[in-house]
Image (cartoon, rainbow, N blue to C red):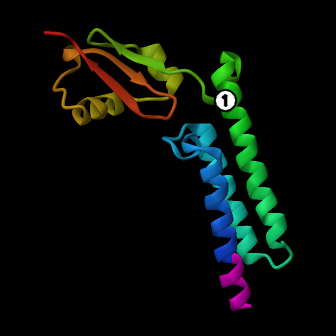
């Protein structure tokens, strides 16, 4: 039983690494919500292959390849068609502009003023008045653009 887990684990992990490398760097890039879901699904599938004796290595490898292929197809499509990109990753949200918070945008994005202030501190900006804009990116990070002096 332990031997099976070790052998299947090694082979399943190697399969996953090969599949991810074949899909390109985009698969391993900074994640948006869609990429996060695919990553969780890949991890869950790998765990199932390791633990469930009823799942053969070939079945698991096929499941991993299918998830990676679907992710590749969606990202390939999102590069070519804006509606796919918007459906999968969403759009960046402008949260502050020219030193002022945009309350409706904050509410819609479910972001607090405290989170924006933390993003400012993280970017080395002392005050909101020193900012041209703050954007919530599709991967959940904040971009802070300073005002020109």
Q: Residue at x 73, y 35 (%)?
A: 73
Query: Does residue 67 lie above or below 126 as drawn?
Result: below
x then y, percent, for residue 102 = 40, 13
The residue that disc 1 covers is: 88
Within the image, what quadrant is residue 44 found in?
bottom right
Main secondary-structure element of the magenta-colored stretch: helix
x then y, percent, for residue 146 = 23, 17
Q: Residue at x 81, y 59 (%)?
A: 62
Query: Does residue 10 lie above or below 134 as drawn?
Result: below
For label 1, count other residues whose C-alpha is less than 10 Å away and answer few (under 14), some (14-19) or many (20+).
Answer: some
Please state, as top left, top right, bottom left or bottom right, where the N terminus lies in the image: bottom right
Q: Residue at x 47, y 17 (%)?
A: 105
Under circle 1, the secondary element is helix
x then y, percent, for residue 53 = 82, 79
Please state, as top left, top right, bottom left or bottom right, where the C terminus lies in the image: top left
Residue 57 lies within the magenta run: no
Q: Nearer the viewer, residue 59 or 54?
A: 59
Within the image, what quadrant is residue 63 found in?
bottom right
Query: Does residue 29 lie above or below 94 as drawn?
Result: below
x then y, percent, for residue 5 = 70, 83
Query: Does residue 49 lie above or below 18 as drawn?
Result: below
Q: Residue at x 65, y 83 (%)?
A: 6
Residue 3 lies within the magenta run: yes
The reply to whether residue 43 is in sight is no
- How many numbered tags mark residues here? 1
The reply to whether residue 93 is in sight is yes
- Give the residues drawn in magenta, as a range: 1-8
Q: Is residue 149 left or right of residue 11?
A: left
Q: Nearer the viewer, residue 46 or 122?
A: 46
Q: Find the residue positioned furthest to the left.
A: 149
């Amino acid at each position: 039983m332990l031997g099976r887990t070790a052998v299947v684990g090694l082979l399943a992990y190697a399969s996953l690494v090969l599949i991810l490398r074949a899909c390109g760097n985009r698969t391993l890039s900074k994640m948006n919500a869609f990429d996060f879901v695919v990553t969780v699904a890949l991890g869950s599938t790998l765990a199932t292959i390791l633990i469930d004796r009823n799942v053969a290595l070939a079945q698991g490898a096929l499941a991993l390849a299918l998830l990676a292929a679907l992710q590749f197809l969606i990202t390939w499509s999102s590069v070519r068609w804006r509606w796919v990109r918007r459906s999968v990753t969403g759009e960046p949200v402008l949260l502050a502009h020219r030193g002022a918070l945009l309350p409706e945008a904050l509410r819609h994005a479910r972001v607090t003023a405290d989170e924006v202030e933390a993003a400012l501190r993280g970017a080395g900006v002392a005050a909101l008045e020193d900012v041209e804009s703050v954007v919530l990116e599709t991967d959940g990070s904040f971009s802070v653009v300073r005002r020109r002096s």
